[in-house]
Amino acid sequence: MGENLDDLTSKCVHCGFCLPACPTYALTGDENDSPRGRIHLMRQVIEGKAELDDAVAEHVDSCLGCLSCVSACPSGVEYDKIIEEFRPQVEDAYADSRGDKAFRELVFGLFPHPARLRVAALGAVAYRRSGGAALVRSSGLLRRFPKLGAMEALMPQTTLRKAWSSMPADTYPRGEQRATVALLSGCVQRVFFGDVNAATARVLQAEGCRVVVPEQGCCGALSLHAGRDEEAKRYARRLIDAFRRPPSSGRVPLSELDAIVVNVAGCGSTLKQYGELLADDPDYAEPAARFAAKVRDVSEILADLEPRAERHRIQARVAYHDACHLAHGQGVRAQPRELLGGIPGLELVEPAEAAFCCGSAGVHNLVRPEAAEELGRRKAERIRATEPDLVATGNPGCLLQIRRHLGDDTPVVHPIEIIDASIRGLTLNPARMRQRAAGSDSGG
């Protein structure tokens, strides 16, 4: 552990402002499960006063990485950098004794790979349509293996058509072109939330953007947040290469892009860190910094563009949940609210603890399902109290987590889907959306 980590941790003055903001501390009340407690443990290891044993590793590994403490800290402690610097060492020291290495390898061997996810989607449709889901649930198998139970409960509703859909490589606005942007299509997003990508492209087109979608792979966000930093770096290099290949049919060089647009909070947070992630790589340091400088969340892009497309009325009460890596990781809070607030008839409501983690946190709700379930229920209670027609949040993990614990009564959507519906003059009927979600695996 180098001086950099020593310097970062030394900024913490243990004031305690992070405690009420920390989800794991809220669950356990254990000081070691708080940001300042974890920093103290890390410093003990750095200074040689403690070993990086299973006890220390467990407290660090249980951190969701939600970064709520970063927003709460008055001293400017960069806990995001601290946890991402220390986590790989925990992963190296703790992976074998943790007891779920095979399950984690399954997760990281599946989710960053869209082709494998499509095969999984095929299995998911068959699982539901064949009656296998009811059989497995009645067997008690999922209760015996909570991690598999969590994966089954969070399985996105989809159809084969949606899972295998693709986006045009290049689309132009119908009116005057105001910007040229590239869209990150994502991994889980591409396969299970293709409707969100399609809505993103339509809204950008309506606001005067040419939208290009290069052939691309995983951005490395899930790997980075789990301490698999070398894996994350490999994904980052490949993604940068995909965006800077020589122009071909429909391809726009990176230098000519006004922005790289992301509609997934966790991915956007990681992409904006590429310059730091690859700072020590002589071949990629400069390209990574240039790439990161162009990354914008879709709400940032739209908030900066003077609205050109007419917004039609949507009569709905919408509860907005701050995705952690959007609010705390990127500091993007006002823009989504501003965009939703600009839709005639829409009433935006704020649940209590709007910026408190829902428990998704990358793969946290899969590898630590018990803690994630407590946080998911807590989030659902806060949202339910606002009596919304719809819930909006800008991250697929949050969508799945909140949808699971909120139940089928209230649809959970990405904000861009609401904006798209308003521009297109569509009626958002919550009852019809609930029926569509419940039956979305009934066809191919």
Image: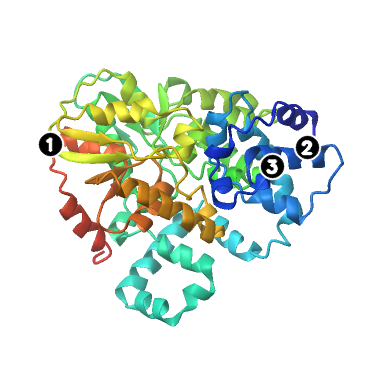
> Toward the viewer: 54 or 101?
54
With 356 as the anchor, is 234 left or right in this view? right
User: Label 2 sits on what residue type?
Assistant: Arg
Q: Closer to us: mark 1 or mark 3?
A: 3
Mark sitting earlier along the chain (2/3): 3
Q: Quadrant of the C terminus?
A: bottom left
With 262 as the anchor, is 369 left or right in this view? right
Residue pointed to by mark 1? 425
Residue 183 visible (yes or no): yes
Residue pointed to by mark 2? 43
The figure's colour scheme reads rainbow
Label 3 sits on a secondary structure element that is: helix
Label 1 sits on a secondary structure element that is: loop
Between marks 1 and 3, how big is the CA–CA gap?
50 Å
Image location of residue 161, percent across then percent down: 28, 58
Residue 191 visible (yes or no): no
- Quadrant housing residue 289: top right
Residue pointed to by mark 3? 38
> Toward the viewer: 119 or 10?
10
User: Label 1 sits on what residue type?
Assistant: Gly
When the figure is inspected, residue 67 is found, relative to residue 105, above or below; the finding is: above
> Toward the viewer: 414 or 46?
46
Image location of residue 229, percent across then percent down: 65, 43
User: Label 3 sits on what residue type?
Assistant: Arg
Mark sitting earlier along the chain (1/3): 3
